[in-house]
Amino acid sequence: MLCYTTYQYFKFKFNCNCGSKGSLEIGQKPLSFKKGGRLLDEKGRLCCPNDRSPLFSIVEKHIKSNDFEVVCKKCQTLFDKA
């Protein structure tokens, strides 16, 4: 997983192929935000569809499954893995 500084809040949970599990949470989830749809996948980077800001990348080679929430810093929109 690679992270950028274009998000205000980022929460990521994952299960590895080896059986390990983990999670991380960066920043404070804002009290008010817009709910977004799907993130754009641009050359392996998950980007905000509103302003094309790269939010994060997942290196899926060893990741069995994942779940996330991310809030774009520019447009204050929350995206998740729905």
Image (tube, rainbow, N blue to C red):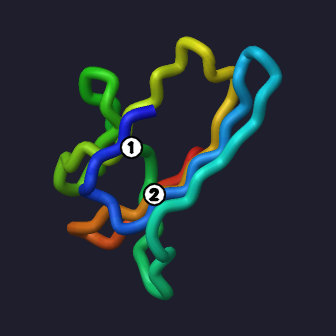
Query: For mark 1, does the 10 Å Cα neighbourhood hold few (<14), some (14 to 19), or many (20 or more) residues?
Result: some
**Residue 2: percent from the left, percent from the top?**
38, 35
Residue 78 visible to the viewer: no
Which residue corresponds to the image point at 44% horizontal and 53% vertical from the top-left? 37
**Residue 6: percent from the left, percent from the top?**
25, 56
**Residue 18: percent from the left, percent from the top?**
77, 16
Q: What numbered label is drawn on residue 10?
A: none
Mark 1, secondary structure of its residue: loop
Q: What numbered label is drawn on residue 70?
A: 2
Would residue 56 be found to the left or right of residue 65 on screen?
Answer: left
Callout 2 amino acid: Val
Which residue corresponds to the image point at 17% horizontal and 54% vertical from the top-left? 51
Which residue corresponds to the image point at 49% horizontal and 87% vertical from the top-left? 31
Q: Label 2 to label 1, Cα distance in Å?
A: 10 Å
Foreground of the two, 33 or 21: 21
Would residue 77 be found to the left or right of residue 24 on screen?
Answer: left
Q: Quadrant of residue 73?
A: bottom left
Q: Earlier in the sequence, mark 2 or mark 1?
A: 1
Q: Looking at the rendering, in which quadrant would you find the N terminus?
A: top left
Foreground of the two, 60 or 50: 60
Extreme residue toward the right, this view: 19
Mark 2, secondary structure of its residue: strand
Would residue 51 be found to the left or right of residue 67 on screen?
Answer: left
Foreground of the two, 39 or 14: 14
Q: Quadrant of residue 19?
A: top right
Image position of 55 with respect to 79: above or below: above
The residue wearing badge 1 is 39
Callout 1 amino acid: Leu
Looking at the image, do the residues carrying marks 2 and 1 touch, with CB atoms under 8 Å apart? yes
**Residue 14: percent from the left, percent from the top?**
67, 37
Which residue corresponds to the image point at 35% horizontal and 67% vertical from the top-left? 8
Image position of 27 with respect to 68: above or below: below
